[in-house]
Amino acid sequence: MIFLVILVAIVVLITVFLLLKFLFPLAVVEGDSMYPTLKEGEELICRRLFFKKHCKVNKIYVIHLRDDENKEPYYIIKRLDKVVKDNNYWFLGDNSLVSYDSRQYGSIKPEQVVAVVLRKVRNSNGS
């Protein structure tokens, strides 16, 4: 009987872990492009997007890009500024002096938008 209880507990923990990992991924802020809203090292809880054509202006999103030189994927965190031609998105960083965003990358396709930022989990000072 105790084996069954332990087995159920393990299955529940694995299920919760997978839900959190895939539906509500964590993102860590790197750089100052979203300062002062988001600071280097802050952890964010996000919600993975499946219907990407319904993004809302002024919300903050995680975007998947590819490096042109070595085709390595990477992610950026930016605020949706507007919807542009062909239902693509225009994203900007809050700190326009240092942000690389749609002004350099151009418009972003809906399928490149990975998640919407829900809230900060931990501040950069650890609190």
Image (tube, rainbow, N blue to C red):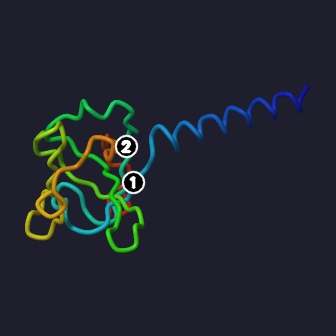
| Residue 90 vertical position relative to residue 34 in the rendered view, above or below | above
Answer with the quarter of the image where residue 33 lies. bottom left
- In the image, taking residue 6 as reference, residue 32 lies left or right, namely left
Q: Who is closer to the viewer here, 96 or 2?
A: 96
Q: Are marks 2 and 1 in contact (CB under 8 Å)?
A: yes
Say whether disc 2 or disc 1 marks the residue closer to the N-terminus: 1
Q: Which mark is residue 46?
A: 2
Q: Position of residue 16 (x, y in %)?
A: 59, 36
If the image is split into quadrants, where does the N terminus sit? top right
- In the image, taking residue 31 as reference, residue 92 lies left or right, namely left
Q: Position of residue 103 (x, y in %)?
A: 11, 60
- In the image, taking residue 60 as reference, residue 72 lies left or right, namely right
In space, the residues marked 2 and 1 are separated at their CA atoms by 7 Å
Q: Position of residue 72 (x, y in %)?
A: 42, 67
Specify few, some or many for label 2: CA neighbours under 10 Å numbering under 14, 14-19, or 20 or more: many
Q: Which mark is residue 27?
A: 1
Marks counted in the figure total 2
What residue appears at the point 72 percent right and 33 percent down from the top-left corner? 11
- In the image, taking residue 52 as reference, residue 90 lies left or right, namely left
Q: Residue furthest top?
A: 1
What residue appears at the point 59 percent right and 41 percent down from the top-left corner? 17
| Residue 34 vertical position relative to residue 81 in the rendered view, above or below | below
What residue appears at the point 28 percent right and 41 percent down from the top-left corner? 110
If the image is split into quadrants, where does the C terminus sit? bottom left
Q: Secondary structure at mark 2?
A: strand
Answer with the quarter of the image where residue 82 lies. top left
Residue type beneath disc 1? Ala
Q: Secondary structure at mark 1?
A: strand
Residue type beneath disc 2? Cys
Q: Position of residue 29 (x, y in %)?
A: 32, 61
Q: Residue furthest bottom?
A: 69
